[in-house]
């Protein structure tokens, strides 16, 4: 038998930081395995999983865009969190029966960022930017935490309302032009959009200006990790708020995937060193 491996698949895939994260952890633990990046186009997805079923060295894959929804049709089962979110970002081989199982570790990544606050308060009011797949993972995480109210800011208000109803959350929706009510007095602000990402539109000024209305001890969590120091994160720190960048979630979602692939928890005590590698510092 050859060397065990896992990988990340997507189209494109060269931007992924997952190989650096998982190979760093493998080296620290002395595990003889590797983690790769594999470019898989949408029309190649079926063939990819057919080949992996014949590969005894393959332990699973992380799934990035645009495959998070389509991948489910090639698996034997999908676990509850992935079903609720409606997307799979982690596929692993069940050690007992060899079945391909879909999971969504983005929920764990979100929880790692907000759990310290939300589980310490009798109530937690959150403003969520966006209605895409990342927003669904955030909403599922918020249902697990003690979040009592969610205010969704989005361009598509009907879709935002439908999300509140689907996840059974109390709250309201608004657009990016009218943020005063959505941001006032909140405990947590989560950006689940691509706003502020390299090559994408910038974070709207009303969001940055609205940070003044947050609670003094509020958390501002930006899922964007390229760049790590987004305009939202920088502004939150300047305002004296608790800013959490996208690398925190990236490591949080990789944590569960690593354990599923390689059968051991990752050595998170080395996170500071890993962050330096990921940011080139």
Image (cartoon, rainbow, N blue to C red):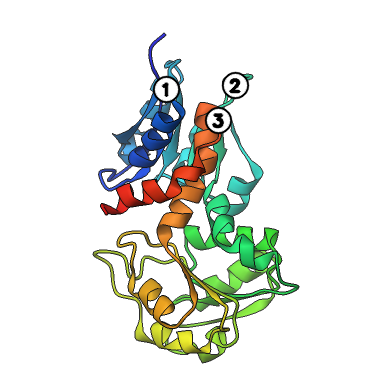
Give the CA separation, mark 3 to mark 2: 13 Å
Residue holding disc 2: 95
Residue holding disc 1: 52
Of circles 3 and 2, which is in front? 3
Secondary structure of the residue carrying tag 1 is helix
Give the CA separation, mark 1 to mark 3: 22 Å
N-terminal-most mark, 1 or 3: 1
Of circles 1 and 2, which is in front? 2
**Crowdedness near tag 1: few (<14), some (14–19) or many (≥20) residues, C-alpha within 10 Å:** some
Of circles 1 and 3, which is in front? 3
N-terminal-most mark, 3 or 2: 2
Q: Quadrant of the C terminus?
A: bottom left
Residue farthest to the right? Answer: 122
Q: Is residue 144 left or right of residue 38?
A: right
| Residue 172 image point, x, y percent | 61, 81
Secondary structure of the residue carrying tag 3 is loop
**Crowdedness near tag 2: few (<14), some (14–19) or many (≥20) residues, C-alpha within 10 Å:** few
| Residue 187 image point, x, y percent | 60, 77
| Numbered label attached to residue 264 | 3
């Amino acid at each position: 038998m050859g060397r065990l491996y896992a990988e990340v698949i997507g189209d494109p895939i060269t931007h992924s930081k997952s190989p650096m994260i998982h190979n760093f952890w493998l080296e620290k633990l002395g595990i003889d395995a590797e983690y790769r990046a594999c470019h898989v186009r949408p029309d190649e997805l079926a063939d990819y999983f057919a080949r992996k079923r014949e590969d005894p060295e393959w332990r699973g894959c992380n799934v990035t865009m645009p495959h998070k929804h389509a991948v489910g049709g090639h698996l034997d089962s999908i676990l509850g969190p992935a079903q609720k979110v409606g997307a799979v970002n982690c596929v692993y081989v069940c050690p007992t029966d060899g079945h391909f199982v879909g999971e969504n570790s983005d929920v764990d990544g979100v929880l790692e960022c907000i759990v310290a606050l939300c589980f310490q308060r009798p109530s937690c009011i959150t403003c969520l930017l966006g209605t895409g797949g990342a927003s669904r993972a955030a909403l599922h995480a918020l249902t697990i935490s003690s979040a009592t109210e969610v205010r969704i800011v989005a361009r598509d208000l009907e879709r935002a309302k439908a999300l509140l109803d689907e996840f059974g959350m109390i709250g309201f929706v608004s657009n990016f032009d009218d943020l005063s009510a959505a941001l006032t007095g909140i405990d947590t602000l989560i950006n689940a959009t691509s706003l502020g990402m390299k090559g994408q539109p910038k974070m709207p000024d009303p969001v940055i200006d609205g940070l003044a209305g947050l609670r003094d001890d509020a958390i501002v969590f930006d899922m964007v990790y390229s760049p790590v120091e987004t305009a939202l994160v920088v502004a939150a720190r300047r305002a004296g708020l608790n800013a959490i960048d996208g690398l925190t979630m990236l490591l949080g979602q990789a944590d569960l995937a690593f354990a599923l692939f390689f059968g051991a928890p990752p050595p998170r005590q080395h996170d500071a060193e890993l962050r330096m590698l990921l940011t080139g510092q």
